Image (tube, rainbow, N blue to C red):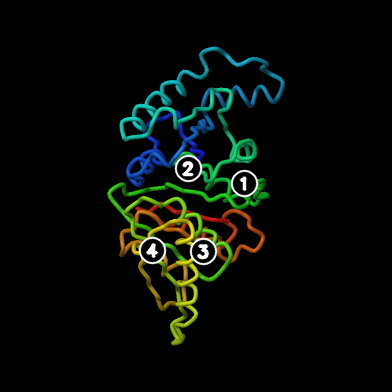
Amino acid sequence: MTTNLLCTVSEDPNMFNGLHFLCRFFENKDNLKLTLLCMAAPDSQYCRWEAGSNNGKAKTLPNDLDQNWKSAQDAALRMLQGDGFKPEDISIKNSSSMICRMEDIEQEIGNEPYDAVVMGRRGLNRLKDFFGKSISHKLLASRPEIPLWLCRKPDFNRRNVLLCVDGSDSAYSMARYLGKTLVGESHKVTLCHINKIKTTDRSGSYDIFNRCEEIMAAEGFDTGLLRHIIFPSDSCRQAILDNANWGKFAVVATGATNNPRKRLLYGSITSFLFTELSGSVLLVHP
């Protein structure tokens, strides 16, 4: 089954963290279709022009304004195709689709049936600023179920996935998404359930593991690649971070725990991992 990914990329090839991750992590690239959307720097010529246009100071886009993006897209295509992506599986938004604000992604997601969004370094820097402000979290509001691959500081030599499960709907949705997305891949997936230190009853953990296995198997995932961890801790977020570092997982996947209103990065665990996780890509299912 094909997975359609919207990839926010920079006009600076040195910030292609998201694309580098896709090249290194996925072995079966025939199942992926990519759409590249440029996220321009706040001080770029394009963003300055856009701000002036919105203020009525500019009406037409200068012809030479998108040269940096054209050079970057050429570099992105060379890299992706050199690592096995087929040209017909890569779409590129033109220069008029460049975005300067995080909120602009919402409209793009509503226009196409994307399965997930992949954000590299520049997009995540902007997302951090967006999250740091006490403003309405409208990002992805039109598609609240779409997962996010947040590639902040990935170690491209890492493998395998740590899937954190707590019995919530968002955790089971993450299991379903990974089950579909990782079909044909060789990555092992470790199901991790955090138990309170004083809790000796593990039946709840086993029930969660069994349900995740059923969900992933229904999507075609090879359950022989599943592993299990029941980790005693009174701090879920620190336990997840410790396991990610000890296991050197390429990806840490989690539902938006403590997020009943499904607002991006609203939960304390997700926002903590977004800030502290290094080496692993954070995969979030709102």
Q: Pointer 2 and pointer 4: residues touching (CB < 8 Å)?
A: no
Q: Nearer the viewer, residue 271 or 111?
A: 111
- Element under disc 1: loop
Residue type of the residue flagged with mark 3: Ile
Q: Residue at x 47, y 80 (%)?
A: 196
Residue type of the residue flagged with mark 4: Thr
Q: Nearer the viewer, mark 3 or mark 2?
A: 2
Tag 2: Cα neighbours inside 10 Å, few (<14), some, or many (≥20)?
few
Tag 1: Cα neighbours inside 10 Å, few (<14), some, or many (≥20)?
many
State how far apart marks 1 and 2 are (Cα): 21 Å
The x, y position of residue 253, in whole percent, is 45, 58
- Element under disc 4: helix
Residue pointed to by mark 4? 223
* Residue 269 badge: 3
Q: Nearer the viewer, mark 3 or mark 4?
A: 4
Residue pointed to by mark 2? 2
